[in-house]
Each structure stands twice: as C-alpha cells, then as structure tokens.
Image: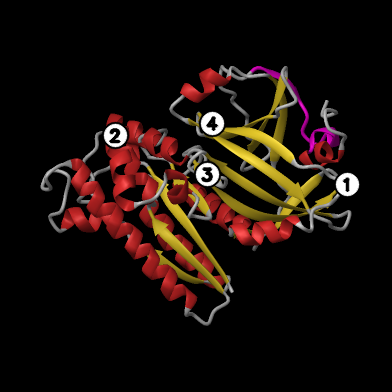
Amino acid sequence: MSISKIVITGGPCGGKTSAVSRIQTALSHLGYTVLVVPETATALIGGGVAPWTCGSNEEYQKCQMKMQMQKEQIFEQAADTMANDKVLIVCDRGELDNKAYMTEEEFAHVLDYLGVTEIELRDSYDAVFHMVTAAKGAERFYTLENNEARYETVEQARELDDRFIEAWTGHPYFRILDNRGDFEQKLRALIREITYFLGELTPFENERKFLIEYPDLEQLEQMPNCQKVHINQHYLRSDPDREIRIRQRGTSEGSVFTFTEKSIEGTRKHLVRQRKLNAREYEMLLLQADPKMREISKTRYCLSFEGQYFEIDVFPCWDDQAIAEIELSSEDVEVVFPPQIKVIREVTGNPNYRNAVIASKPKGATH
C-alpha cells in the first residue's frame, strides 16, 4: 500500500481551492483515493477563533497547529484502513504555513508546546507545492471576495507569499508554481508535477547543474530564504542502469531518512520510487551499501530566488568550488541566479559531476 501526503500552499489568491478540486478529479482518474485535509485557519476564523479573539497570536497559533496536527493524524489513520493500494492525502496548507504568521520567538514557543522540531514538521510531508499569489504577475485577478478569512492587500499578499516560500525552503521536494502562463496552465503544471512525484509519469529529470565558485557561507546562512541541511548519502548495490541510494538528511534538530531509486538512460535519469525510512530501516539498508562506492557527505543550502529553488552542495574536500542544481518545469525556462552565486560553467550531463561518480572515486579525488 502506498500512502503519500502532500501540501498545497501559496500566497493569498494563489489558486489553492481550485487546485485541490483539480487534484481530486485528476488523481481519482488515475486510481487514487484522494483525501483532503481542509484548511484549518478558515474553519477556525469562520467559527470565531482568531488571533484577534484569542488572548494573543501565540495562543491562537497553538490552537490552530494542534488542531491541524490532529486532523492530519486522523486522516493518516483512516488511510491505513482503506482497501485501495494508492492513497493520496492532500493538505490544504501544512503546519509550516503557520510560521509565516509568527515571530521567531512565538514559533519557538509553539514548537515547544507541541513537542516537535521544525524539521519534523517540515519533512513529515512527502512533497510541497506552492501556488504563487495572483498579486505577483497576475494582479488583475487578485480578489478578497472568494474567502471570508482573506483580508490582505496586494502588497501584503506578496510579502506573505515570500514568507510561505521562506518557511518551506529546505524541504527535499519543494516546487513553486508561478503565474507566467494563464491560470489553466498553472493548474495543468501542478497536476503534472504531482503525477511526476507520484511516479505515474516517468519523464527524464529536467535538472540543470552548474559548477560555481565557493560561496560565502556566512552570507548564505544569513539569508531568510535559505536553509542549511547536512546530507550523508550511500549508494547500494544495483544494476548498471539503476541508481539506488539511501540518505540521511537533517540539522542539529534531527534527521530524516529516505530511499530513492532512479533509472539511468545515458546521462539522464528519472525517478522510479522514493519513500521515507525509519532509523532502523536505514541502518539495515546500510548493510547493502556498495563497497566500491564511498559515502557522500555534504552540506546543502536550499535557496529560493525569483520563484526558483536552488540546491547548493558544498563538499568538505572542496575549498574553491561547489555545485548548484535546479529542477525546472521545462527545458526553455531561463535560470535566474541570485547575485551571491558566481557560475564557473554549466556541467549538466557531465558524468564527472554526478554524486555517484564522486562516490566511486578515491577519497580526496573529487575534482
């Protein structure tokens, strides 16, 4: 049985309601049982529980996040009992959306109240899809009329959209759907991204990879839309046309573990399957590690900029260069680099810069 839990997030008037409805229709046709966890804030505010009616914003956020966590647990419990072998849980906003409405101090207090860490909340979802507000690039369609809980001006909607992106930056599967086309194109792009993620469509990865100058790490870490994670990656024994890896990904707050399998055709790959592991499963799979390939250890900086999501990998044995990767929706999308990133050259398709190749080289021979 396969149960996936995804988040549909985004700024005000980004199209979440229409997106959830389209997901239900499209994925049901693909044989999925689609469960929708409704937005918690709209229900609470509509019922009179709001930041301005509670004792403080922090007290309201404790109520909202606790209720949202319990709702998701109930949906997961119900999904476990269903006969269909393909279940998709769609969350209309996720736990980290609430971070956009709090100060750092308030957020820390709420996490302590719930007894969880930020990474546990963020990575409890399998994928996150952000619908950019109409206030960015489709201003004439921005309206407050279709949601009684919405009150933001265009300027406030843009700022809030940025805060949602900042909150989710660092998630291992984060996609941003912008307003470059019309709304129907935006919805079709969302469905395409979700079906890619679920493995219903198996396109080649449209990933671009660049060799960059070693970045100013202190500057990166100070950016609000950048998150640092540590990655330990092992490759398992597999056929030549398969790449199987297990990964420990985390911060000082904790780690999550994943299993990923990709098929390889020439220099291109596509996802076959991916799933979360618990710590025991990870330790057991380590016994299947390919002895010819060493562990990859790196620090990844996840950075969102101009609607694009970059992953910058810094290796401990490199002191003059690093790797920047970006997953694009199509081959004709222009890559817009942050000013902090200095590109040396593109290395997309260059086998010498694949992680699996780096892992097969003797220690210290990553160049």
Which numbered disc flags the more N-terminal residue, 4 or 1? Answer: 1
User: Which residue has dot 4 on it?
Assistant: 303
Disc with the residue nearer the chain's start (1 vs 3): 3
Foreground disc of the pair 2, 3? 2
Residue 86 position within the rendered picture, expressed as x and y whole percent measured from the top left: 56, 72
The residue mark sitting in front, 2 or 4, is 2
Q: Earlier in the sequence, mark 4 or mark 3?
A: 3
Please give the range of residues in magenta: 342-354
Closer to the N terminus: mark 2 or mark 4? Answer: 2
- Report how far apart the C-alphas of labels 2 and 4 lie in the structure: 23 Å
Residue under pointer 3: 171
Q: Is residue 340 left or right of residue 199?
A: left
Q: What color scheme is it?
A: secondary structure
The label on residue 105 is 2
Residue 192 appears in which quarter of the rendering? bottom right
348 falls in the magenta region: yes
| Residue appearing at x 36%, y 56% in the figure | 17
Residue 182, image x and y in percent? 47, 44
Residue at point 73%, 55% (across, down): 286
